[in-house]
Amino acid sequence: MRIALYNDSLRTALGGPTAFVVSLSEMLARAGHEVSVLTADTTDAPAAWNQASNPRLINIGPLRRFGLLTSDGAVRARDALAGVDAAHLSGLWVPSAAQLAAMCRRARVPYVLSLHGTLNDWPMAQSRWHKRLYLATLARPFLRGARFIHCTSLGEQAQATPRLPWGCRTKVIFPPIPLSDASSRMPAAGGRVGPTLLFVGRIHPVKGLEHLIEAMALVRTSGARLTIAGTGDEAYVAQLRALATAKGVADSIQWAGFVEGAAKEALYASAAAFVLPSSQENFGLVLFEALAAGTPVITTRHVDTWRELQSQGNATIVDQDAASIAAGIDQVLAHPSPRQGAMAGRDWARGVLAPENLLPSYLAMYGPDNHRPLSPG
């Protein structure tokens, strides 16, 4: 198949959507499909893509005001979409993605839209009237024209479906996550400085880090420390640092900044537990990365995959408040997962995200067997 994928930016600091597009593109290309990756920001695109013919990187930026394509960018996008068998777009609130969807409808190219949690309860509660107006007007042809609306979990599907126009079809497929061989190492036990807890991700209010910082003041395990690996708005980071000082735990928290590759794998492997106290996650990629490293995870019921995570046995699900998070941390640190449990969690994560298991589902979502007529517009 010839498949075009679009995300407006490939900056790794933006988190899940970028990782999704990069890993999906490479999975499809390795399987012999002809892949074009369209973006308006090539920052952090894999270096090999600049020389490779598959995936083929196509820059249709920069974007103009309101995040729309320029006339030149629109020409490059139309040329890239000519002759493809399917397109996979990311981002409901991305005006340039809506433009590409309109191009697909006019050219009768079937397309899939990945929501990435945009219709979940928490984000829909932010600027709710603007979003409801957009859904009722400009977003309707965008959504109704899609062959499928792609969700990455049953929890995301359940929240999104009531907000979709009548007739939209959804498909749940886990995102492909590349897990290197190094991620299979077992986590090291805490040393003389005490066990280390780990958070990896964007530093953003949706991640609930204030609850984790407050929990650190309640954790009873002696010498427990927290590493926060990520970046965010400087003013918000300053607020969190001030909270840590006010709670008397500033000396127990290391701010590691953005990490990737071997450095991130080393953090996972050495952590006693990984903690993600989010208000909303449509998938929670980092939770699966931690499990694949053999590291137990602690998270909330606001993560759409919490039931799947809990079922595999190396995850602790807590309420999103400091006392519950602290109790969960103490429970995990007091009763470390035996090697058998850690390996079971690792094998489960690697199995459900294995490309050979996910590829057929993605191809079926794109393929002609699922075709339905598309209305130009």
Image: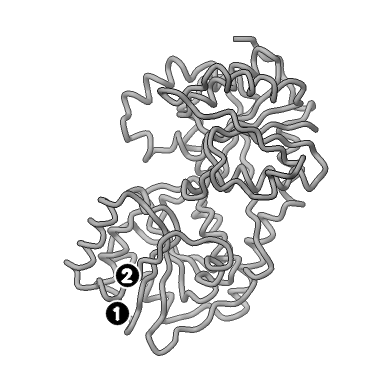
- Left or right of 268? Residue 24 is right
Q: Residues within 10 Å of mark 1 (few under 14, many from 20)?
A: some
Mark 1 highlights which residue?
220
- The kind of residue on which mark 2 rests is Ala
Residue that protrudes farthest toward the left in the picture: 246
- Of 196 and 304, nearer the camera is 196
Q: How crowded is mark 2: few (under 14 residues within 10 Å), some or many (20 or more)?
A: many
Picture layout, residue 94 above or below residue 244 = above
Q: In this view, does 34 lie to the left or right of 192?
A: right
Q: In which quarter of the image is residue 5?
A: top right
Name the spot of residue 375 as percent of width and height, x first.
Answer: 64, 11
Considering the image in quadrants, where does the N terminus appear?
Answer: top right
Residue at position x 37%, y 19% from top? 133
Most foreground residue, 94 or 110? 94
Q: What element carries label 1?
A: loop
In the picture provided, is 372 more to the left or to the right than 312? right
Amino acid at dot 1: Arg
Question: In this figure, which residue is indicated by the disc labeled 2?
Answer: 326
- Find residue 262 and report its image quarter: bottom right
**Can you name the residue that lies furthest to the right here?**
32
Percent coordinates x, y for residue 166 in the rendering: 53, 19
Q: In this view, does 279 lie above or below 72?
A: below
Judge by depth and name the residue closer to the eye, 93 or 294: 93
Where residue 222 appears, as percent x and y from the top left, is 32, 84
SS at badge 2: helix
